[in-house]
Image: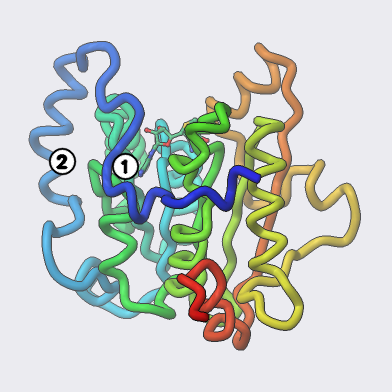
Amino acid sequence: MTAHKAGDPTTLNRLYGRSQGKPLRAGQQELVDTLLPQIAVPADGPVTAQGLFGQDCPLHFEIGFGGGEHMAYRADLLPDHGFIGAEPFVNGVAQALTHVRDGRLTNIRIHHGDALQVLERIPDGSLTMLYLLHPDPWPKARHAKRRMMNDGPVQMFANKLKPGGEFRFGTDHPVYLRHALMVMRRFTDPATGPFEWLVEGPQSWQQRPSGWPQTRYEAKARNVYGHEVWYFRYRRRSEGGAAFKQIGAPQSG
Ligand SMILES: C[S@@+](CC[C@H](N)C(=O)[O-])C[C@H]1O[C@@H](n2cnc3c(N)ncnc32)[C@H](O)[C@@H]1O
């Protein structure tokens, strides 16, 4: 039961995984030096639509956007919505900046670093959509605490989404899938869970929902490694969150 080990990314308070791959090409470095400072999430203070985009608008947040394909697609599709993406891997940030520049996308803000550090600065009940696509699997049981799908982060997702808001999660990793379903089972408890799983049958998790484009990572998982990919959509309930906050907290008595 790895999900119940003490600790998760909200308490570990450090980043695991790569922050740099191949050296950036000159054009990519130029984007990191010039475009990133213009659209970076400010380092301090509350993170709001008004502060980032100068107006109230539906706010979307993508955790670990990789090369930014999904975020750019969604931002292009919904030009009146604001998008925040967080990614510690600088090569991915550079690719996302290329999408921002080429697509002339003015509704994206980027944090080069840990998603949770930005997410915690977003006022509760602000997000319309939250995306977690193919999080790093950390398949060994002793690394389960590093998985983003654990009680601390998922409770934060619930807190930050507004009632009716949606959390989308996708993975191609069977170990991660089992772990995530175990966590989400508690978070979708009909009496106390803050989420409702939007499911009508196997096609709900086996077929790509509309408006959910394939990323390069997902294409490789399918076409190179022959993996299946599973898709999940959870709606934030208007009640349930407060009761759920007790789960996972230290028990008294
Ligand atoms: C397997 S990749 C998937 C990338 C992308 N979501 C996709 O589907 O193409 C996982 C990504 O999560 C990023 N990541 C890991 N920990 C993170 C964190 N704490 N905050 C934000 N991103 C993180 C990694 O750098 C990596 O790019």
Q: Quadrant of the N terminus?
A: top right
Q: Residues within 10 Å of mark 1 (few under 14, many from 20)?
A: many
Would you place residue 133 above or below residue 191 in this image?
above
Residue 137 is situated, as x and y percent measured from the top left of the image, at 54, 32
Numbered disc 2: secondary structure: helix
Residue 212 is left or right of residue 27, and the answer is right
Residue under label 2, please give it: 35
Mark 2 is on which residue type? Leu
Residue 52 is situated, as x and y percent measured from the top left of the image, at 22, 66
Would you place residue 23 above or below residue 162 in this image?
above
- Where residue 147 is drawn, which disc sits there? none
Can you name the residue that lies furthest to the right here? Answer: 201
Residue 97 is situated, as x and y percent measured from the top left of the image, at 28, 37
Would you place residue 209 above or below residue 221 in this image?
below
Camera-nearest residue between 252 and 28: 252
Residue under label 1, please give it: 100
